[in-house]
Image: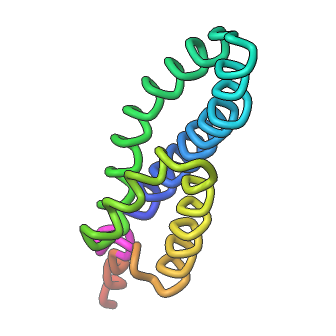
């Protein structure tokens, strides 16, 4: 049960990390230069608004996933702030995915209810 919940949280986190990162990269490297040099506000208004709203979703999803992985508070804050720096959310996603895979391989994500012992065989 806990393993499946952690897997779903990982998928949600990965989708939001990449979405937030791509929108921020477009905003910083296309929208801001177009705003400054061409006075074109379209990309900044549309992509900036999308990034802003989706960053709030990213915060919730990242918080949920880091809590499931039992990430220390200082690292959790860095993961949450990663959505504000271009490419940082992608780096944080890779690091957390590796941590998830390592904990999964070590059996740290298993739930005691998942490994219930089978009922003893009937005595003859």
Q: Quadrant of the N terminus?
A: bottom left
Residue 3 position, x and y percent, is 44, 64
Q: Is residue 110 above or below residue 90?
A: below
Q: Quadrant of the rendered structure where residue 25 is?
A: top right
Residue 4 position, x and y percent, is 46, 57
Q: Quadrant of the C terminus?
A: bottom left
Name the foreground residue: 54 vs 41.
Answer: 41
Say which residue appears at 67% left-offset and 24% top-offset.
Answer: 31
Residue 75 position, x and y percent, is 35, 69
Q: Is residue 32 magenta?
A: no
Q: Report the number of discs.
A: 0
Q: Is residue 72 above or below residue 15?
A: below
Residue 112 position, x and y percent, is 29, 74
Give the magenta range: 110-115
Say which residue appears at 63% left-offset and 53% top-offset.
Answer: 87
Say which residue appears at 66% left-offset and 16% top-offset.
Answer: 43
Horizontal relation, residue 57 to residue 32: left or right:
left
Q: Is residue 1 above or below residue 12?
A: below
Q: Is residue 73 above or below residue 90?
A: below
Residue furthest to the bottom in view is 124
Main SS, magenta residues: loop
């Amino acid at each position: 049960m806990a393993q499946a919940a952690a897997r779903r949280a990982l998928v949600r986190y990965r989708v939001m990390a990449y979405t937030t990162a791509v929108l921020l990269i477009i905003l910083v490297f296309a929208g801001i230069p177009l705003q400054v040099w061409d006075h074109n506000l379209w990309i900044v208004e549309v992509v900036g608004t999308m990034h802003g709203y989706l960053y709030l979703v990213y915060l919730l999803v990242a918080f949920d996933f880091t809590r499931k992985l039992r990430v220390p508070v200082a690292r959790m804050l860095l993961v949450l702030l990663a959505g504000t720096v271009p490419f940082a959310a992608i780096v944080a996603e890779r690091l957390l995915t590796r941590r998830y895979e390592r904990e999964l391989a070590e059996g740290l994500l298993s739930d005691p209810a998942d490994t219930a012992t089978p009922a003893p065989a009937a005595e003859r």
